[in-house]
Image: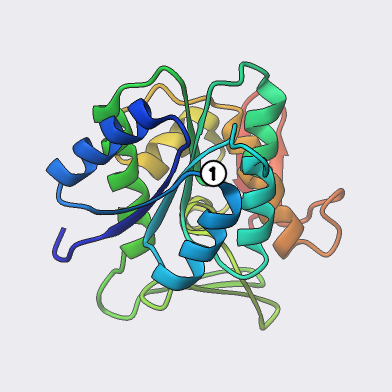
Amino acid sequence: MCDVKRVLLVEDELKISRLVRDYLHQAGFTVVEATTGPAALSLARAERPDMIVLDLGLPGMDGLDVIRELRKTSAVPIIILTARTEESDRIVGLELGADDYMVKPFSPRELVARIRAVVRRADATIGGGEVVQAGPLTIDIPKRRVTVHGAEVDLTATEFELLLALARRPGRIYTRAQLLDALHGVSFESYERSVDAHIKNIRRKIELDSKRPRLVLTEYGVGYKLADA
């Protein structure tokens, strides 16, 4: 990384917090810590972190509620940490706008790798003023700007990269695994259904009717594609 990135770590279990903090420091990140939801929201406003690592099982204010509040004003990348085994909790977190998640117990090294992957997505720029045009979609890559029928839409870093992967080859069908590879840039054993949650968010933002999509189409049993204009 060319500059030091600031990570807001929101975790109330001291042992886990210290472990993650130490690994992040070793990887060259600056770490700001919170143990409650309200403290996380306050620090997010004051410190403007480049990334938030967020435990869902917080005292007083649930981590999902923290994501809801953050997404009202910020597209900061978020990775969820959770001990919850219910699939629905992970999906709700992703649908609320989280970029990725890890289930406890987890590998601190893999967490650092995932943080780096998400930060790269948020920082990624391509020289030469490249703009991708696909039907009513215009994606200005250096500016990280997406417009649909001329109206700008606000996407998270993960949503941006996922839509960009589809828009580069309209009409091509991508499996969920291929889209995960395009997002991470490294090999992770990620939950493929997480792609569905991100697609749902993208549709909600760019489609006239997200229940009847005309742009991002599902190929049942295979994956997704962008409509070939």
Residue found 54% across the figure and 44% down from its top: 172
Residue found 56% across the figure and 38% down from its top: 173
**Residue highlighted by disc 1:** 172
Near-viewer residue (199 or 135)? 199
Label 1 secondary element: loop
Coordinates of residue 103 in the picture (x, y in percent): 48, 23
Give left or right: position of 229 versus 162: right
Give left or right: position of 102 versus 217: left
Coordinates of residue 191 in the picture (x, y in percent): 52, 24
Coordinates of residue 141 in the picture (x, y in percent): 40, 71
Give left or right: position of 76 versus 226: left
Residue found 30% across the figure and 68% down from its top: 125
Identify the image quadrant of residue 220.
Answer: top right
Identify the image quadrant of residue 137.
Answer: bottom right
Give left or right: position of 215 versus 73: right
**Is 85 above or below relative to 38?**
above
Mark 1 residue type: Arg
Coordinates of residue 11 in the picture (x, y in percent): 45, 38
The quadrant of the image that shows the N terminus is bottom left
Number of numbered discs present?
1
Near-viewer residue (228 or 211)? 211
Q: Is residue 186 visible?
A: no
Identify the image quadrant of residue 217.
Answer: top right
Q: Is residue 215 visible?
A: yes
Residue found 54% across the figure and 26% down from its top: 192
